[in-house]
């Protein structure tokens, strides 16, 4: 194609053009392009004044090590079918990231089925992502609600609970009021809160339903936040009470937390799981991403490491951790462990749960002690991203 490409932030007219392009490229309407108009950054590529590619970017905090880290979350990107095959998507990603980096993003997260393409650009998946389903009758037979009371609707207390629980994992978004409204409006969610009499709210459940043509409904869980095992059991028991209307409870991809309450509670393990494309993480600014993350308060260490940069060269860094904080800077000391850009992202998210898993992922180390220290430093909390964008 002869006409030169230009890249720009979208004005109202270009937002509308991109909405039309995305519908054509995806084969269906992308509702988020409308829902996120006030909150997202949209960068587009133009050829002869016509939008031929683009994508949304959200600047939000994600929790890592219990601390909020500014993240560029990229979603709803596409290239016009007639423009594909010219590496336009790669150029478009750089354009989408730049304004978010200028506003403070030090990491970036995407959710994509094109994992090979994302890996070439420096993203990697810390964990598998599953959608799960279980028979409603099985939940009813396996769990009891105890003395938990159930009330319909959200309150300020449920939002505080969700934020407090999100800090206990590596990856969840620090939700703002607009984020909650966006999800509510998009999926028409119904919320329930769980608490023992006289005690604070201990559980938040949100559901979406769809009527079956002849009888009953589909029931899909969008949020499952429990402060304790009894609260989680009460939430499973409540879902089981829907057995007269819904045969199966579906847990949307990544929504069910990676703890064993369901596994250990079912009388008969008749569940199904479907693998979905994963969330993938990329470190945009190594020193700032390290500084802003939370670290184990009881760990004091200095570990020389080598990290691959975007040109394929390797730099030497000294990682120092003390009293719940860490910093990293250039050094002349030979590294005792080496991370590619992608391996660094997985380590940052706590995706390597042991030294064998790190070594099997290709992480090289000359010191078992150094590698063990590095693994311990990020595995205090588990990786989990239940938020969708």
Image (cartoon, grey):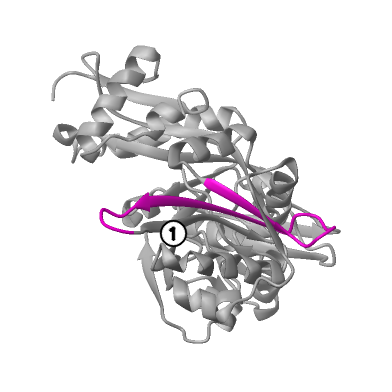
Q: Looking at the picture, how far across and down is residue 193, in whole percent?
A: 66, 53
Residue beneath the point at 59% across and 83% down = 264
Give the magenta part as a residue range: 190-215
Q: Looking at the picture, how far across and down is residue 169, in whole percent?
A: 65, 59
Left-right relation of 307 to 12:
right
Q: Looking at the picture, how far across and down is residue 384, in whole percent?
A: 57, 60
Choose between 77 and 22: the one closer to the eye: 22
Residue beneath the point at 61% across and 65% down = 235
Left-right relation of 8 to 359:
left
Residue 192 drawn in magenta? yes
Asked if residue 128 is positioned above or below residue 41 in the image, the reply reads below
Choose between 9 and 22: the one closer to the eye: 22
Asked if residue 4 is positioned above or below residue 385 in the image, the reply reads above
Residue beneath the point at 51% across and 59% down = 255
Residue beneath the point at 40% across and 27% down = 34
Report which quarter residue 375 is drawn in. Answer: bottom right
């Amino acid at each position: 194609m002869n006409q030169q490409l230009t890249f720009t932030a979208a004005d109202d007219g270009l937002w509308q053009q991109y909405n039309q392009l995305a519908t054509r490229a995806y084969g269906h309407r992308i509702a988020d392009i409308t829902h996120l108009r006030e909150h997202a950054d949209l960068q587009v590529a133009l050829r002869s004044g016509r939008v031929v590619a683009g994508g949304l970017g959200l600047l939000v905090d994600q929790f890592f090590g219990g601390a909020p880290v500014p993240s560029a979350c990229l979603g709803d990107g596409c290239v016009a079918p007639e423009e594909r095959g010219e590496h336009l998507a790669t150029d478009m990603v750089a354009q989408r990231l730049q304004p978010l980096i200028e506003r403070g993003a030090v990491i970036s997260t995407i959710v994509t089925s094109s994992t090979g393409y994302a890996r070439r650009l420096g993203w990697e998946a810390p964990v598998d992502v599953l959608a799960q389903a279980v028979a409603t009758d099985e939940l009813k037979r396996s769990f009891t609600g105890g003395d938990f009371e159930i009330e319909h609707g959200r309150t300020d207390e449920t939002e505080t609970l969700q934020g407090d629980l999100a800090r206990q994992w590596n990856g969840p978004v620090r939700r703002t009021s607009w984020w909650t409204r966006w999800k509510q409006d998009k999926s028409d969610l119904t919320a329930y809160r769980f608490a023992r009499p006289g005690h604070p709210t201990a559980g938040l459940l949100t559901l979406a339903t769809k009527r079956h043509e002849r009888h009953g409904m589909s029931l899909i869980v969008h949020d499952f936040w429990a402060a304790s095992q009894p609260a989680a059991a009460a939430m499973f028991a409540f879902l089981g009470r829907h057995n007269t209307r819904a045969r199966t409870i579906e847990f949307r991809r990544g929504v069910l937390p990676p703890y064993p309450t369901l596994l250990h509670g079912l009388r008969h393990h008749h569940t199904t799981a479907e693998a979905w494309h994963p969330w993938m993480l990329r470190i945009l600014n190594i020193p700032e991403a390290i500084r802003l993350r939370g670290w184990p308060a009881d760990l004091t260490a200095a570990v020389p490491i080598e990290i691959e940069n975007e040109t394929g060269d390797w730099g030497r860094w000294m990682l120092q951790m003390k009293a719940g904080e860490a910093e990293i800077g250039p050094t002349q000391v030979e590294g005792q462990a080496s991370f590619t850009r992608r391996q660094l992202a997985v380590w940052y998210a706590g995706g390597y749960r042991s030294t064998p898993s790190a070594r099997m992922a290709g992480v090289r180390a000359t010191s078992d002690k150094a590698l063990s220290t590095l693994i311990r430093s990020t595995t205090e909390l588990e990786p989990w991203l239940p938020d969708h964008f």
